[in-house]
Amino acid sequence: MNIHQALQLAKTDLAGSSPSAVLDGQVLLAFSLNCNTAHLAAWPEKDLDKEQAARYQQLIQQRASGIPVAHLTGTREFWSSNLHVDDSTLIPRPETELLVEFILEKFADDTNLKLLDMGTGTGAIAISIAREKPDWSIFASDISEQALSLAAKNTKIQQTDITLIHSDWFSDITEKDFDVIVSNPPYICSDDPHLSQGDVRFEPRSALVSGDDGMDDIEHLCAQAKNHLAENGWLIVEHGYNQDQLVADCFSKNAYTDIQQRQDLSGHTRMTAGKL
């Protein structure tokens, strides 16, 4: 089997189970060969050895059963960092980069700000900000000790200085006067049919579901962040594509001003920010 044939195998075998069969095949083959995807395009006739072919075919079978590519490779790229992932956290997704982008634009000229990333998971948001703003004081919290262990691993690999805190939202956050509190919280409705589809089947339900309308944790964040933000501090959250008005109303109810929202590449509003 050569590289071209291996990619055709993925295209065929994953067609009925993955919406990104071609890309999945490329990522899994590059992982099997310990190379980048550019190498695959440059050497389509290069043969796989028996061990590489067996490993690749096993990965394709696992992906066909639904296991996320990120769990098979153990990594996912986010904001140009290659982060380690496992089944204790959400897999970082492109729409979450909206939060990073907004913060870096909003506070482009600010130095020595104090930021808290709540429900940090892999550490994706905190690490991305810390790499861009090494002079800021960055804190990150999570209720899951396993997630914090993973975030610590990623923090070390990315050589970033982040204070990690084990906390159920604000229960063990003793710091005050944050300039920014940012979060990608659970926001899916408990009966959402998407919970039984795709990659989310393999991610922790506690990191996905937040009550009947998906708003429980966002409402908690809006109410409690006020006790930990500095004057003119900002709360920034990711939310579902159909929650923009609910979240904006929640921010308004809790006296946040200058409320701003951002859309993802599909044109869905996925982020809301407000100033205390």
Image (cartoon, rainbow, N blue to C red):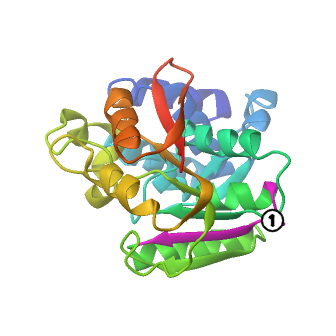
Residue 73 lies left or right of residue 111; in this view the side is: left
Q: Position of residue 215 (x, y in %)?
A: 27, 45
- In the rendered image, the quadrant that contains the N terminus is top right
> Considering depth in this image, is 67 or 145 the residue closer to the camera?
145
Corner quadrant of residue 260: top right
Q: Can see residue 177? A: yes
Query: Dot 1: what SS?
Result: loop
Corner quadrant of residue 94: top right
Position above or below: 193 against 110? above
Residue 134 on the magenta segment: yes
Position above or below: 210 against 148? above
Extreme top residue here?
Answer: 267
> Considering depth in this image, is 148 or 203 the residue closer to the camera?
148
Q: Position of residue 174 (x, y in %)?
A: 50, 82
- Seen at 62% across and 75% down, the residue is 153
Residue at which label 1 appears: 112
Residue 151 lies left or right of residue 168; in this view the side is: right
> Considering depth in this image, is 110 or 216 the residue closer to the camera?
110
Residue 267 lies left or right of residue 138; in this view the side is: left
Residue type, numbered disc 1: Asn
Q: Which span of residues is magenta-colored?
A: 132-142
Q: Position of residue 261 (x, y in %)?
A: 53, 30
- Seen at 52% across and 61% down, the residue is 85
Residue 19 on the magenta segment: no
